[in-house]
Image (cartoon, rainbow, N blue to C red):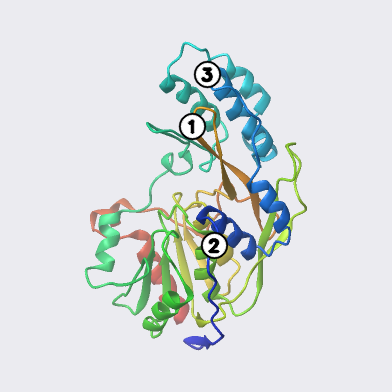
Amino acid sequence: MNMISMKVKSEKRKVKNLLPQSFVRWWHALAVANLSLITFTLTFSCVKEEPYDNTRQGVFEAAWKILDEHYCFFDYKQQELGVDWDEVHTRYARQVNEGMNSAQLFEVISNMLAELQDGHVNLSSSFDYGRNWSFYEDYPENYNDSIAKLYLGHNYQLASGLKYITLDDNIGYVRCETFEEGVGDGNVSSMLQMLASCNGLIIDIRGNGGGQLNKAHTLASHFTNEKILVGYISHKTGKGHNDFSSPQAEYLDPASDGIRWQKSVVVLTNRAVYSAANDFVKCMKQCPNVTIMGDQTGGGSGMPFNSDLPNGWHIRYSAVIFYDRDMHHTEFGIQPDITLSMSGADIAQKKDTYIEKARAFLNEKRQ
Protein backbone atom coordinates (compact mmCIF):
# COMPACT_ATOMS: atom_id res chain seq x y z
CA MET A 1 0.00 0.00 0.00
CA ASN A 2 0.94 3.67 0.19
CA MET A 3 2.87 5.36 2.94
CA ILE A 4 1.20 5.16 6.33
CA SER A 5 0.82 8.87 6.75
CA MET A 6 2.09 12.23 5.67
CA LYS A 7 3.11 14.91 8.16
CA VAL A 8 2.65 18.52 7.22
CA LYS A 9 3.76 21.41 9.38
CA SER A 10 2.55 24.96 9.26
CA GLU A 11 2.46 27.97 11.52
CA LYS A 12 -0.49 27.92 13.90
CA ARG A 13 -2.60 31.01 14.21
CA LYS A 14 -4.93 31.85 17.07
CA VAL A 15 -8.07 33.87 16.43
CA LYS A 16 -9.97 35.39 19.30
CA ASN A 17 -13.73 35.21 18.91
CA LEU A 18 -15.48 38.43 19.76
CA LEU A 19 -18.76 37.53 18.06
CA PRO A 20 -21.84 35.60 19.25
CA GLN A 21 -21.49 31.84 18.87
CA SER A 22 -24.37 31.56 16.38
CA PHE A 23 -22.67 34.07 14.08
CA VAL A 24 -19.28 32.39 14.51
CA ARG A 25 -20.68 29.06 13.29
CA TRP A 26 -22.25 30.77 10.29
CA TRP A 27 -19.02 32.65 9.50
CA HIS A 28 -16.99 29.44 9.74
CA ALA A 29 -19.28 27.73 7.25
CA LEU A 30 -18.92 30.60 4.82
CA ALA A 31 -15.14 30.52 5.17
CA VAL A 32 -15.12 26.81 4.41
CA ALA A 33 -17.23 27.44 1.31
CA ASN A 34 -14.91 30.25 0.17
CA LEU A 35 -17.71 32.79 0.01
CA SER A 36 -16.89 36.42 -0.58
CA LEU A 37 -20.22 38.07 0.02
CA ILE A 38 -19.71 38.66 3.73
CA THR A 39 -21.48 42.02 3.62
CA PHE A 40 -24.63 40.36 2.34
CA THR A 41 -24.39 37.68 4.99
CA LEU A 42 -24.19 40.19 7.80
CA THR A 43 -27.27 41.95 6.49
CA PHE A 44 -29.26 38.76 5.95
CA SER A 45 -28.44 37.25 9.33
CA CYS A 46 -29.79 40.35 11.05
CA VAL A 47 -32.98 40.60 8.98
CA LYS A 48 -35.96 42.15 10.77
CA GLU A 49 -39.26 40.37 10.25
CA GLU A 50 -42.50 42.18 9.43
CA PRO A 51 -44.38 42.77 12.72
CA TYR A 52 -47.50 40.70 13.39
CA ASP A 53 -49.97 40.90 16.27
CA ASN A 54 -49.59 38.48 19.16
CA THR A 55 -52.88 36.77 18.33
CA ARG A 56 -53.52 33.20 17.21
CA GLN A 57 -53.95 34.37 13.63
CA GLY A 58 -50.99 36.75 13.88
CA VAL A 59 -48.62 34.03 15.10
CA PHE A 60 -49.78 31.66 12.38
CA GLU A 61 -49.38 34.28 9.63
CA ALA A 62 -45.93 35.23 10.92
CA ALA A 63 -44.77 31.61 10.80
CA TRP A 64 -46.06 31.09 7.27
CA LYS A 65 -44.63 34.39 6.01
CA ILE A 66 -41.16 33.83 7.49
CA LEU A 67 -40.89 30.53 5.63
CA ASP A 68 -42.42 32.01 2.48
CA GLU A 69 -39.72 34.69 2.29
CA HIS A 70 -36.66 32.87 3.61
CA TYR A 71 -36.98 29.10 3.11
CA CYS A 72 -34.67 27.86 0.36
CA PHE A 73 -36.14 24.58 -0.90
CA PHE A 74 -39.63 25.47 -2.15
CA ASP A 75 -38.95 24.62 -5.80
CA TYR A 76 -37.22 21.38 -4.87
CA LYS A 77 -39.95 20.34 -2.40
CA GLN A 78 -42.64 21.10 -4.96
CA GLN A 79 -40.79 19.00 -7.52
CA GLU A 80 -40.16 16.07 -5.16
CA LEU A 81 -43.17 16.24 -2.83
CA GLY A 82 -45.72 18.36 -4.65
CA VAL A 83 -45.70 21.00 -1.89
CA ASP A 84 -47.58 24.19 -2.88
CA TRP A 85 -46.87 26.66 -0.08
CA ASP A 86 -49.87 28.89 -0.94
CA GLU A 87 -52.18 25.87 -0.86
CA VAL A 88 -50.63 24.82 2.44
CA HIS A 89 -51.47 28.27 3.85
CA THR A 90 -55.09 28.03 2.73
CA ARG A 91 -55.52 24.55 4.21
CA TYR A 92 -54.01 25.29 7.62
CA ALA A 93 -55.31 28.86 8.03
CA ARG A 94 -58.83 27.41 8.22
CA GLN A 95 -57.80 25.54 11.36
CA VAL A 96 -56.78 28.67 13.30
CA ASN A 97 -59.16 30.62 15.51
CA GLU A 98 -58.78 32.92 18.50
CA GLY A 99 -60.53 30.44 20.81
CA MET A 100 -57.87 27.76 20.50
CA ASN A 101 -55.28 27.26 23.24
CA SER A 102 -51.49 27.44 22.82
CA ALA A 103 -51.04 23.69 22.46
CA GLN A 104 -53.63 23.57 19.67
CA LEU A 105 -52.00 26.47 17.82
CA PHE A 106 -48.60 24.84 18.24
CA GLU A 107 -49.92 21.63 16.70
CA VAL A 108 -51.41 23.42 13.68
CA ILE A 109 -48.21 25.33 12.92
CA SER A 110 -46.02 22.27 13.51
CA ASN A 111 -48.15 20.20 11.14
CA MET A 112 -47.91 22.95 8.54
CA LEU A 113 -44.12 23.04 8.79
CA ALA A 114 -43.95 19.24 8.66
CA GLU A 115 -45.31 19.37 5.10
CA LEU A 116 -41.80 20.39 4.00
CA GLN A 117 -40.24 17.16 5.37
CA ASP A 118 -37.16 19.05 6.50
CA GLY A 119 -35.41 18.16 9.74
CA HIS A 120 -34.04 21.70 9.89
CA VAL A 121 -37.55 23.19 10.00
CA ASN A 122 -38.67 23.33 13.62
CA LEU A 123 -40.98 25.16 15.97
CA SER A 124 -39.87 25.48 19.59
CA SER A 125 -41.73 26.59 22.70
CA SER A 126 -41.34 26.05 26.42
CA PHE A 127 -43.55 22.95 26.23
CA ASP A 128 -42.73 21.23 22.94
CA TYR A 129 -40.48 20.99 19.90
CA GLY A 130 -42.20 20.70 16.52
CA ARG A 131 -40.27 18.59 14.02
CA ASN A 132 -40.46 16.15 11.14
CA TRP A 133 -37.81 13.50 11.63
CA SER A 134 -39.23 11.04 9.12
CA PHE A 135 -35.87 11.11 7.32
CA TYR A 136 -34.73 8.45 9.80
CA GLU A 137 -37.77 7.49 11.90
CA ASP A 138 -39.50 5.86 8.90
CA TYR A 139 -36.52 3.61 8.09
CA PRO A 140 -34.59 0.74 9.70
CA GLU A 141 -32.05 2.02 12.19
CA ASN A 142 -29.27 -0.23 10.89
CA TYR A 143 -27.38 0.33 14.11
CA ASN A 144 -27.39 -1.46 17.43
CA ASP A 145 -25.62 0.53 20.10
CA SER A 146 -25.08 -2.37 22.49
CA ILE A 147 -23.45 -4.47 19.74
CA ALA A 148 -21.33 -1.61 18.38
CA LYS A 149 -20.00 -1.00 21.88
CA LEU A 150 -18.66 -4.56 21.94
CA TYR A 151 -16.18 -3.58 19.23
CA LEU A 152 -14.93 -0.60 21.21
CA GLY A 153 -14.83 -2.49 24.50
CA HIS A 154 -13.74 -0.61 27.63
CA ASN A 155 -10.19 0.25 26.58
CA TYR A 156 -10.87 2.47 23.60
CA GLN A 157 -9.05 5.77 23.31
CA LEU A 158 -10.78 9.13 23.15
CA ALA A 159 -9.73 12.24 21.22
CA SER A 160 -12.20 15.10 21.66
CA GLY A 161 -15.30 12.98 21.15
CA LEU A 162 -13.72 10.56 18.65
CA LYS A 163 -13.62 7.06 20.14
CA TYR A 164 -11.13 4.75 18.48
CA ILE A 165 -9.44 1.37 18.78
CA THR A 166 -7.45 -1.12 16.72
CA LEU A 167 -9.51 -4.24 16.02
CA ASP A 168 -7.93 -7.70 16.20
CA ASP A 169 -7.40 -7.87 12.41
CA ASN A 170 -5.40 -4.63 12.54
CA ILE A 171 -8.19 -2.46 11.16
CA GLY A 172 -8.68 0.89 12.88
CA TYR A 173 -12.20 1.65 14.06
CA VAL A 174 -13.33 5.23 14.80
CA ARG A 175 -16.74 6.07 16.26
CA CYS A 176 -17.82 9.66 15.49
CA GLU A 177 -21.19 10.33 17.12
CA THR A 178 -21.44 14.08 16.61
CA PHE A 179 -19.73 17.13 15.14
CA GLU A 180 -20.71 19.27 18.12
CA GLU A 181 -17.51 18.27 19.89
CA GLY A 182 -14.34 20.31 19.38
CA VAL A 183 -12.78 18.20 16.61
CA GLY A 184 -9.50 19.88 15.73
CA ASP A 185 -6.44 19.14 13.61
CA GLY A 186 -4.44 18.22 16.70
CA ASN A 187 -7.03 15.72 17.92
CA VAL A 188 -7.41 14.09 14.51
CA SER A 189 -3.65 13.93 13.91
CA SER A 190 -3.01 12.38 17.32
CA MET A 191 -5.66 9.75 16.64
CA LEU A 192 -4.31 8.95 13.17
CA GLN A 193 -0.79 8.69 14.59
CA MET A 194 -2.00 6.12 17.11
CA LEU A 195 -3.70 4.16 14.29
CA ALA A 196 -0.82 4.57 11.81
CA SER A 197 0.14 0.89 11.79
CA CYS A 198 -3.40 -0.23 10.88
CA ASN A 199 -4.08 -1.72 7.47
CA GLY A 200 -7.20 0.37 6.93
CA LEU A 201 -9.65 2.62 8.73
CA ILE A 202 -13.39 2.49 9.49
CA ILE A 203 -15.13 5.76 10.40
CA ASP A 204 -18.56 4.94 11.82
CA ILE A 205 -20.86 7.99 11.76
CA ARG A 206 -24.17 6.15 12.03
CA GLY A 207 -26.60 8.20 14.10
CA ASN A 208 -24.49 11.36 13.76
CA GLY A 209 -27.08 14.14 13.51
CA GLY A 210 -24.56 16.86 12.63
CA GLY A 211 -23.20 19.81 14.54
CA GLN A 212 -20.67 22.35 13.34
CA LEU A 213 -19.90 22.29 9.64
CA ASN A 214 -16.30 23.38 10.10
CA LYS A 215 -15.68 20.43 12.45
CA ALA A 216 -16.93 18.01 9.80
CA HIS A 217 -14.62 19.61 7.25
CA THR A 218 -11.69 19.49 9.67
CA LEU A 219 -12.01 15.72 9.95
CA ALA A 220 -12.46 15.27 6.19
CA SER A 221 -9.41 17.44 5.44
CA HIS A 222 -7.12 14.72 6.80
CA PHE A 223 -8.06 12.36 3.97
CA THR A 224 -6.95 14.33 0.92
CA ASN A 225 -3.57 15.65 -0.21
CA GLU A 226 -5.04 18.11 -2.69
CA LYS A 227 -7.61 20.88 -2.69
CA ILE A 228 -10.77 19.32 -4.11
CA LEU A 229 -14.11 20.64 -5.30
CA VAL A 230 -16.82 19.12 -3.11
CA GLY A 231 -19.88 21.17 -4.02
CA TYR A 232 -21.54 24.53 -4.45
CA ILE A 233 -23.43 26.89 -2.16
CA SER A 234 -26.25 29.32 -2.93
CA HIS A 235 -28.09 31.66 -0.54
CA LYS A 236 -31.27 33.70 -0.64
CA THR A 237 -30.89 37.24 -1.97
CA GLY A 238 -34.51 38.33 -1.67
CA LYS A 239 -38.00 37.36 -0.55
CA GLY A 240 -39.03 35.55 -3.72
CA HIS A 241 -38.89 31.77 -3.88
CA ASN A 242 -36.34 31.97 -6.70
CA ASP A 243 -34.20 34.80 -5.35
CA PHE A 244 -30.78 33.16 -4.99
CA SER A 245 -27.17 34.06 -5.49
CA SER A 246 -25.21 32.34 -8.25
CA PRO A 247 -23.78 29.03 -6.98
CA GLN A 248 -20.29 29.47 -5.56
CA ALA A 249 -17.76 26.67 -5.49
CA GLU A 250 -17.09 24.94 -2.17
CA TYR A 251 -13.65 23.39 -1.75
CA LEU A 252 -12.10 21.06 0.79
CA ASP A 253 -8.52 22.04 1.55
CA PRO A 254 -6.10 19.36 2.77
CA ALA A 255 -5.11 19.61 6.41
CA SER A 256 -2.24 22.07 6.64
CA ASP A 257 -1.10 20.84 10.02
CA GLY A 258 -0.60 17.29 11.24
CA ILE A 259 -1.20 13.92 9.59
CA ARG A 260 -3.02 13.02 6.40
CA TRP A 261 -4.17 9.41 6.14
CA GLN A 262 -2.95 7.61 2.99
CA LYS A 263 -4.57 4.18 3.27
CA SER A 264 -8.06 2.87 2.50
CA VAL A 265 -11.02 4.22 4.47
CA VAL A 266 -14.61 3.06 4.84
CA VAL A 267 -17.27 5.48 6.14
CA LEU A 268 -20.36 3.77 7.62
CA THR A 269 -23.70 5.58 7.22
CA ASN A 270 -27.37 5.18 7.99
CA ARG A 271 -30.52 7.30 7.67
CA ALA A 272 -29.79 9.15 10.91
CA VAL A 273 -26.68 10.77 9.37
CA TYR A 274 -27.86 14.35 8.95
CA SER A 275 -26.88 17.98 8.45
CA ALA A 276 -23.12 18.52 8.99
CA ALA A 277 -22.61 14.74 9.02
CA ASN A 278 -24.36 14.56 5.64
CA ASP A 279 -21.92 17.22 4.40
CA PHE A 280 -19.02 15.16 5.78
CA VAL A 281 -20.14 12.26 3.60
CA LYS A 282 -20.42 14.61 0.62
CA CYS A 283 -16.79 15.64 1.15
CA MET A 284 -15.47 12.15 1.84
CA LYS A 285 -17.01 10.81 -1.38
CA GLN A 286 -14.56 13.05 -3.25
CA CYS A 287 -11.51 11.97 -1.26
CA PRO A 288 -9.19 9.28 -2.66
CA ASN A 289 -9.21 5.80 -1.11
CA VAL A 290 -12.60 6.39 0.56
CA THR A 291 -15.63 4.11 0.21
CA ILE A 292 -19.06 4.93 1.65
CA MET A 293 -20.89 1.85 2.94
CA GLY A 294 -24.31 1.41 4.52
CA ASP A 295 -27.65 3.09 3.97
CA GLN A 296 -28.54 6.37 2.32
CA THR A 297 -27.91 9.32 4.62
CA GLY A 298 -30.80 11.37 6.01
CA GLY A 299 -29.82 14.56 4.16
CA GLY A 300 -30.32 18.02 5.57
CA SER A 301 -28.30 20.11 3.11
CA GLY A 302 -29.78 23.49 4.05
CA MET A 303 -28.05 25.75 6.55
CA PRO A 304 -30.62 26.69 9.23
CA PHE A 305 -31.55 30.17 10.44
CA ASN A 306 -33.81 31.19 13.33
CA SER A 307 -36.57 33.78 13.73
CA ASP A 308 -38.87 34.76 16.58
CA LEU A 309 -42.66 34.68 16.51
CA PRO A 310 -44.83 37.36 18.20
CA ASN A 311 -45.67 35.10 21.17
CA GLY A 312 -42.03 34.24 21.95
CA TRP A 313 -41.88 30.92 20.13
CA HIS A 314 -38.90 30.31 17.84
CA ILE A 315 -38.99 29.01 14.29
CA ARG A 316 -36.07 27.47 12.43
CA TYR A 317 -35.77 26.99 8.68
CA SER A 318 -33.26 26.11 5.94
CA ALA A 319 -32.01 29.31 4.31
CA VAL A 320 -28.86 28.34 2.37
CA ILE A 321 -28.53 25.50 -0.14
CA PHE A 322 -25.50 23.22 -0.33
CA TYR A 323 -25.21 21.14 -3.53
CA ASP A 324 -22.78 18.36 -4.35
CA ARG A 325 -20.03 18.85 -6.94
CA ASP A 326 -22.44 17.91 -9.75
CA MET A 327 -24.97 20.53 -8.60
CA HIS A 328 -27.32 17.86 -7.30
CA HIS A 329 -29.36 18.35 -4.13
CA THR A 330 -28.40 16.26 -1.10
CA GLU A 331 -31.38 17.49 0.96
CA PHE A 332 -32.89 14.00 0.96
CA GLY A 333 -29.61 12.17 1.44
CA ILE A 334 -26.55 10.70 -0.27
CA GLN A 335 -26.42 7.18 -1.65
CA PRO A 336 -23.56 4.94 -0.43
CA ASP A 337 -21.08 3.32 -2.77
CA ILE A 338 -22.01 -0.07 -1.26
CA THR A 339 -25.48 -0.58 0.23
CA LEU A 340 -25.81 -2.60 3.43
CA SER A 341 -28.53 -3.65 5.87
CA MET A 342 -28.12 -5.09 9.33
CA SER A 343 -28.54 -8.86 9.27
CA GLY A 344 -30.87 -10.47 11.79
CA ALA A 345 -28.56 -13.47 11.95
CA ASP A 346 -25.61 -11.21 12.73
CA ILE A 347 -27.55 -9.38 15.43
CA ALA A 348 -28.44 -12.74 17.03
CA GLN A 349 -24.72 -13.50 17.19
CA LYS A 350 -23.98 -10.01 18.52
CA LYS A 351 -22.18 -9.02 15.35
CA ASP A 352 -22.48 -5.70 13.52
CA THR A 353 -23.04 -6.41 9.81
CA TYR A 354 -21.71 -2.99 8.81
CA ILE A 355 -18.46 -3.29 10.74
CA GLU A 356 -17.87 -6.89 9.64
CA LYS A 357 -18.46 -6.03 5.95
CA ALA A 358 -16.16 -3.03 6.23
CA ARG A 359 -13.40 -5.13 7.80
CA ALA A 360 -13.68 -7.75 5.08
CA PHE A 361 -13.65 -5.06 2.39
CA LEU A 362 -10.54 -3.37 3.77
CA ASN A 363 -8.67 -6.65 4.29
CA GLU A 364 -9.49 -7.73 0.74
CA LYS A 365 -8.26 -4.41 -0.68
CA ARG A 366 -4.96 -4.91 1.12
CA GLN A 367 -4.31 -8.25 -0.58
Discs 1/2, front: 2
Name above or below for residue 15 compared with residue 178: below
Q: Which amino acid is tagged 1?
A: Gly
Disc 1 is placed on an element classified as: loop
Q: Residue 56 carries which label?
A: 3
Residue identifier under label 2: 18
How far, Cα to Cα, is label 1 from label 2? 27 Å
Q: How crowded is mark 1: few (under 14 residues within 10 Å), some or many (20 or more)?
A: few
Between circles 3 and 2, the one closer to the viewer is 2
Which tag is nearer the camera, tag 3 or tag 1?
1
Residue 97 lies left or right of residue 88; in this view the side is: left
Q: Are marks 1 and 2 in contact (CB under 8 Å)?
A: no
Q: Is residue 262 visible to us here? A: no
Question: Residue 332, how many percent across, how many down?
Answer: 57, 46
- 137 relative position to 221: left or right: left
Q: Indicate which disc, 1 or 2, sits on the residue closer to the N terminus.
A: 2
* Callout 2 secondary element: loop
Q: Where is residue 51 in the image (x, y as percent from the top left)?
A: 63, 28
Name which residue type carries label 2: Leu
Image quadrant of residue 94? top right
Q: Is residue 259 above or below residue 204?
A: below
> Quick check: 98 left or right of 249?
left
Residue drawn where x is 67% and y is 52% of the image: 42
> Which label number is shown at residue 312?
1
Quarter of the image with the C terminus in it: bottom left
Residue at (46, 49) in percent of width and height? 271
